Image (spheres, coloured by chain):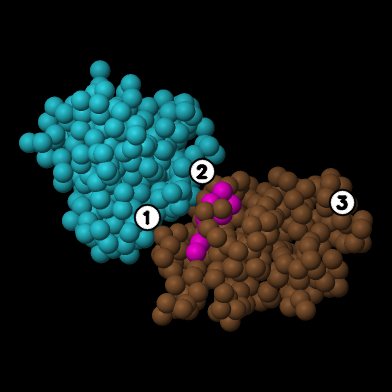
Chain colours: A cyan, B brown
């Protein structure tokens, strides 16, 4: 029993340094919409996704890699970039074989923090790739940090619900002494059968739905519609890197 | 509708600076056990409770005020102090008319942060004084921050459950656009009828129960057994200060 690896849930990037993550797989969770879009682009055959934290860096890497640049602010494509953050913009017919350079704020920040703090592996997760993430965590046998990207460091529900969905599926394989994880599991159990209506009560929903993104948000809580494992390797998220 | 004051829940001291608290009543919540003990001592007639963050400061203020010094580490009274942190140590026969100088870590830290950041009023709450806290928040008509003291900055469930209990009772009087509050309310609704068993699953329970404090912890989640309003005034918590 005591040899099971640990699993902890971190509810905001602000709380990451309270945990020793040096021997952990860190799952970056940014359900609305970064990690949902990343899974979708890779599922549809993107060669890689490069997550960056600023528009100038996005433009720069777009030029260097020949990749597609993407980013939004206030619901519109940022001037100087080519596409938006919606998973619906990246069907196979468009993204296959391409490099996507994606500006995000919350998710990218947490990802870089996890790398700086010495995570042994960084992957990304959202409902579209729930099963693949769970299978990987169980098979890796390492300690796990479920890292919620939050919204400008404030707690959010959609990332917490995804952490809860993971915990519900894999908890028997881990040692879990963590109130955040217990809460997340409870919240997902409470709402797993009313997700489309419950997410309409979250603050992030109200923020994004104002920009006409309801269909996107419903997609982002759809389970296993883009089952790939994005693994951060040499500056980019790749599927099954060697 | 739009003129209702705002209510937000802050899940850890680390997240307090994400909120403008300058026009707010801040409720310091440290259920296990600081704010439960504070309510109890004042309910039983203590003249005041001075919360301090270190043992030397506790000893110093005990000398200056002639007060009773109290503090524990690892379940034992700290050397140089007179009493522990248990609410059961402060019956009326002992504490009436006395000043209690109490060392706590998580709760005192958050209280001082709230003062430094310009809260317009700082009060303390826990299940023993739930109704009095709720009545005060409704009648004050100010914006509210429910501040969870957490455990060394990590999210904890017992403080969150108290926030949820407050929200359940007073939500119709406030504008609440806050995922932390929605989660807290959900968690309390889910567990309000199984609190004694549910709190036995929390990390803090396991930490303190190891020191034989089960009876204390059950008391700390008992509603309205010490209904006073501790208000921070001139360095101390007082009941109904002028």
Q: Where is residue B29 in the image (x, y as percent from the top left)?
A: 61, 61
The numbered mark at residue A15 is 2
Q: In this view, does A107 lie above or below B26?
A: above
Q: Which structural element holds mark 1?
A: helix
The chain carrying label 3 is: B
Q: Can you tell which of label 3 and label 1 is closer to the viewer?
A: 1
Residue marked by disc 1: A157
Q: Can residue A89 be seen in this view?
A: yes
Q: Percent x, y for residue A183?
A: 43, 54
**Which residue is disc 3 drawn over?**
B59
Residue occupying the point 73% across, 78% down:
B240
Could you tell me which residue is drawn at 62 percent across and 51 percent down?
Answer: B209
Could you tell me which chain the residue with mark 1 belongs to?
A
Q: Is residue B111 left or right of residue A216?
A: right
User: Which image quarter is the C terminus of chain A in?
Assistant: top left
- Spatial distance from mark 2 to mark 3, Cα to Cα? 33 Å
Task: Tell whether A93 sits left or right of A138.
Answer: left
Position of residue A9 in the picture relative to residue B95 (left or right): left
In which quadrant of the rendered image does the N terminus of chain A lie?
Answer: top left
What segment carries the magenta color?
A: B8-16
- The answer to whether one can see residue B12 in this image is no
Q: Dot 1 surroundings within 10 Å: few (below 14), some, or many (20 or more)?
A: many
Query: Between disc 1 and disc 2, whose residue precedes?
Result: 2
Label 2 lies in what chain? A
Mark 1 vs mark 2, CA separation in Å: 16 Å
Q: Is A2 inside the magenta-drawn segment?
A: no
Dot 3, how many residues are within 10 Å of its Cα: few (below 14), some (14-19), or many (20+)? many
């Amino acid at each position: 029993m005591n040899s099971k690896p640990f699993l902890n849930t971190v509810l905001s990037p602000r709380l990451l340094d309270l945990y020793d993550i040096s021997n952990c797989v860190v799952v970056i969770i940014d359900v609305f919409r970064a990690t949902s879009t990343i899974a979708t682009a890779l599922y549809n055959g993107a060669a890689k996704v490069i997550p960056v934290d600023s528009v100038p860096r996005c433009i720069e890497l777009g030029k260097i890699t020949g990749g597609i640049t993407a980013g939004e602010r206030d619901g519109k494509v940022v001037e100087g970039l080519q596409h938006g953050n919606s998973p619906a913009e990246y069907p196979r017919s468009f993204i296959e074989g391409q490099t996507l350079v994606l500006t995000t704020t919350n998710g990218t920040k947490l990802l870089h923090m996890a790398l700086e703090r010495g995570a042994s592996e960084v992957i990304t997760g959202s409902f579209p790739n729930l099963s693949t993430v769970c299978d990987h965590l169980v098979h890796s046998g390492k300690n796990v940090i479920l890292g919620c990207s939050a919204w400008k460091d404030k707690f959010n529900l959609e990332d917490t619900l995804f952490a809860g969905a993971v915990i519900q599926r894999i908890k028997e394989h881990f040692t879990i002494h963590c109130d955040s994880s217990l809460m997340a599991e409870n919240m997902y159990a409470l709402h797993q059968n009313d997700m489309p209506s419950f997410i309409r009560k979250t603050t992030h929903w109200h923020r994004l739905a104002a920009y006409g993104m309801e269909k996107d948000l419903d997609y982002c809580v759809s389970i296993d519609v883009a089952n790939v494992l994005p693994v951060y390797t040499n500056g980019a998220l790749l599927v099954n890197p060697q």
